[in-house]
Image: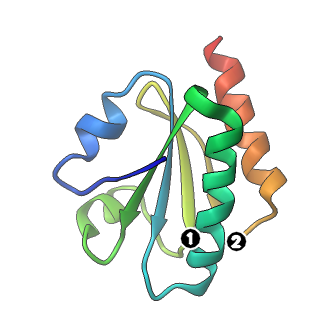
Amino acid sequence: METVVTDADFQEKVLSSKGVVVVDFWAPWCSPCLILGPILEELTEEFGDKMQLVKLNVDENPQTAAKYGIQGIPTVIVFRDGQISAQLVGLQPKDAFKEKIEAAIKREQ
């Protein structure tokens, strides 16, 4: 299940979290973002409690988007224990996201 994060709670919900947190930087007007959403939700179901998915609307939360240099959306950043493990820009095949998430989970074990 996804969680919405904002500029105000990004530190608490992402950077202070233990484990793997996948952040989907998106906007409601972005067609590729709307296609990617369900793909990330499928991966969340597949990985279960090994990862957490959070979504950040770049229009409503420009500070965090700027901090991470988000130029194009969708951008997905995989964090592990508050550190960036991987970053993917644009709509890519499900396997590309799965591979990056699996790598972050394996590093944790």
At label 2, counting other C-alpha atoms closer than 10 Å, the crowd grade (few under 14, some 14-19, many 20 or more) is some
Q: Which mark, residue 97?
A: none
Q: Viewed as shown, does residue 29 lie left or right of 40?
A: left
Going by the numbered disc 2, the residue's amino acid type is Leu
Query: Does the residue at mark 2 contact the one at mark 1 (Cβ under 8 Å)?
Result: yes
Residue drawn at (67%, 34%) of the image: 47
Residue 51 location (% of width, % of height): 56, 33
Alpha-carbon span between mark 2 and mark 1? 7 Å
Residue in the image at 68% along x and 38% along y? 101
Quadrant hosting residue 105:
top right
Spot occupied by residue 99 in the image (x, y as percentages of width and height):
79, 41
What quarter of the picture does the C terminus occupy? top right
**Residue at the spot x=21%, y=46% of the render?**
9
Determine whether the residue tagged by mark 2 lies in a helix, strand or loop.
loop
* Callout 1: SS: loop
Horizontal side of residue 86 vs 7, given as left or right: right
What is the quadrant of residue 86 in the picture? top right
For residue 92, side relative to residue 21 (left or right): right
Front residue (pair 43, 78): 43
Question: Height in image: 57 above or below 55?
Answer: below
Q: Is residue 37 above or below residue 49?
A: below
Graded by Cα atoms within 10 Å as few (under 14), some (14 to 19) or many (20 or more), the crowding at tag 1 reads many
Closest to the observer: 62 or 99? Answer: 99
Q: Determine which residue is flagged by label 1.
A: 74
Q: Amino acid at mark 1?
A: Pro
Front-lying residue, 69 or 46 = 46
User: Picture coordinates of residue 15 (x, y %)?
Assistant: 34, 34
Q: Earlier in the sequence, mark 2 or mark 1?
A: 1
x then y, percent, for residue 1 = 49, 47
Numbered tag placed on residue 91 in the rendering: 2
Quadrant of the image occupied by residue 78: top right
Residue at 25 percent of width and 39 percent of height: 11
